[in-house]
Amino acid sequence: MHSTASRTQAISHPRSDADRQEDLSSALTAFIIYVTKESGHDFFRVVGELDLSITQIKALMLLDRVHDELCVKHLAEELFVSLPAASRSVEGLHARGLVEREEDHEDRRMKRVRITPTGRDIVQTLAESRLAGIAQFVATMSPSQQRTLAAAVAPLLERQEISACLPRRTR
């Protein structure tokens, strides 16, 4: 097992491209796990207040991500749940106004579902609960560490698929 110092050095001075990628992937994974653990309490509190099942949360997040409607069958496949489980989740989300559903124009047996603005607000609320954990972490960093991290992350934000995920500013 590498010490923290040698792992940090390995990230900045890799032995090979494969080693560099593995070390960077490991470092990013460690950071994500840390932040997820630290913000878990707030996230689960929000989930509890929303009174949604994990399948319903996953459905909302998927529908928010695809920015389009899905048939319930495809939703079930993407969520790795049975069609009846997906149908029950959609029914509960529809009853709360978080998704809209309608019959497919070509096949009336199929139901199409899309997220509503209220559903998008729920996804944003969940994201903000995770963001709070990251904000708490950043607050523990020195100004120098913050600048270094900001400079390292800046090239990532040049990728449109990443910058599209930036949370709305709350201030």
Image (cartoon, rainbow, N blue to C red):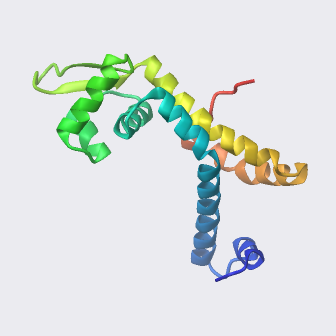
- Write down the quadrant of residue 148 in the picture: bottom right
Residue at 72 percent of width and 79 percent of height:
3
Left or right, 59 with respect to 129, comes to left
Res. 113 in view: no
x and y percent of residue 112 in the render? 24, 25
x and y percent of residue 81 in the render? 25, 45
Residue at 31 percent of width and 20 percent of height:
94
Q: Nearer the viewer, residue 42 or 122?
A: 42
In the image, residue 94 sits, relative to residue 39, either above or below, namely above
In the image, residue 123 sits, relative to residue 153, either above or below, namely above
Residue at 68 percent of width and 81 percent of height:
2
Q: Nearer the viewer, residue 40 or 121?
A: 40
The total of numbered circles placed on residues is 0
Left or right, 58 with respect to 168, comes to left
x and y percent of residue 29 in the render? 58, 61
Res. 30 in view: yes
